[in-house]
Image: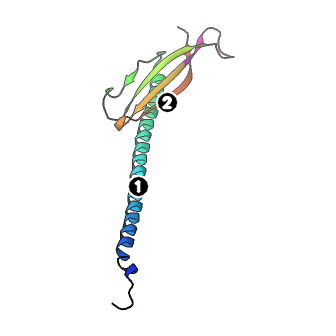
Amino acid sequence: MHGVSLKSKGFALPLALILLAVLSLLLAQALGGAAGEAALAANRQFRLGAFESAESGLFATRAALLATPAVSLPATDRHAEDSPVEGSITEVRHVGDGDTPVGFSLGRFVTRHLELRSTGRSARGAKVTLVESIDRLDARP
């Protein structure tokens, strides 16, 4: 073997192994980051589903309040408590009565302060609670 020194033999194999290890680490990190992003996107989607369920519960309760002269409604359960499906539980709480607005006949109307609380659930346990206060003008009993 002419022109080849003993020090340069076997240099390619360790270099190739080091490059392969570095590339493997970079690939593993990229795949881990992609899996983390997919999990974050799925969690965001489930939270959005829970938010939409809570919002639809508030909408349905507001519509029921407009349709009935009752001061408060019972909590409406649209799903079983341990069910993994999307749904909402809405509660109406009577906070108190207010003064009759200016310009109305004295003593014939009362302003009811109500609090609507809707908790939306989604699959995988995502939960969002929305609270809304409304004032309702009712005839005095």
The numbered disc on residue 130 is 2
- The colour scheme is rainbow
Magenta includes 116?
Answer: no
Identify whether 58 is placed above or below 5: above
Kind of residue sitting beneath label 1: Ala
Which secondary structure lies at badge 1? helix
Q: Quadrant of residue 56?
A: top left
Q: CA distance from mark 2 to mark 1?
A: 32 Å
Crowding around mark 2 (Cα neighbors within 10 Å: few <14, some 14 to 19, many 20+) is: some
Where in the figure is residue 50, as x and y percent of width and height?
Answer: 42, 36
Which secondary structure lies at badge 2? strand
Where in the figure is residue 15, as x and y percent of width and height?
Answer: 39, 72
Q: Quadrant of residue 125?
A: top left
Magenta region, mostly helix, strand or loop? loop
Q: Which residue is mark 1?
A: 34
Q: Please report the residue visible at 38 percent of the width from the left and 87 percent of the height from the top.
A: 4
Q: Quadrant of residue 22?
A: bottom left
Q: Please report the residue visible at 51 percent of the width from the left and 27 percent of the height from the top.
A: 131
Q: Is residue 19 left or right of residue 98?
A: left
Q: Nearer the viewer, residue 53 or 47?
A: 47
Identify whether 72 is placed above or below 41: above
Sequence-earlier tag: 2 or 1: 1
Q: Nearer the viewer, residue 6 or 76?
A: 6
Magenta includes 104?
Answer: yes
Q: Nearer the viewer, residue 20 or 2?
A: 2
What's drawn in magenta, residue-wise? 100-113
Where in the figure is residue 141, as x and y percent of width and height?
Answer: 52, 7
Q: Is residue 116 left or right of residue 10?
A: right
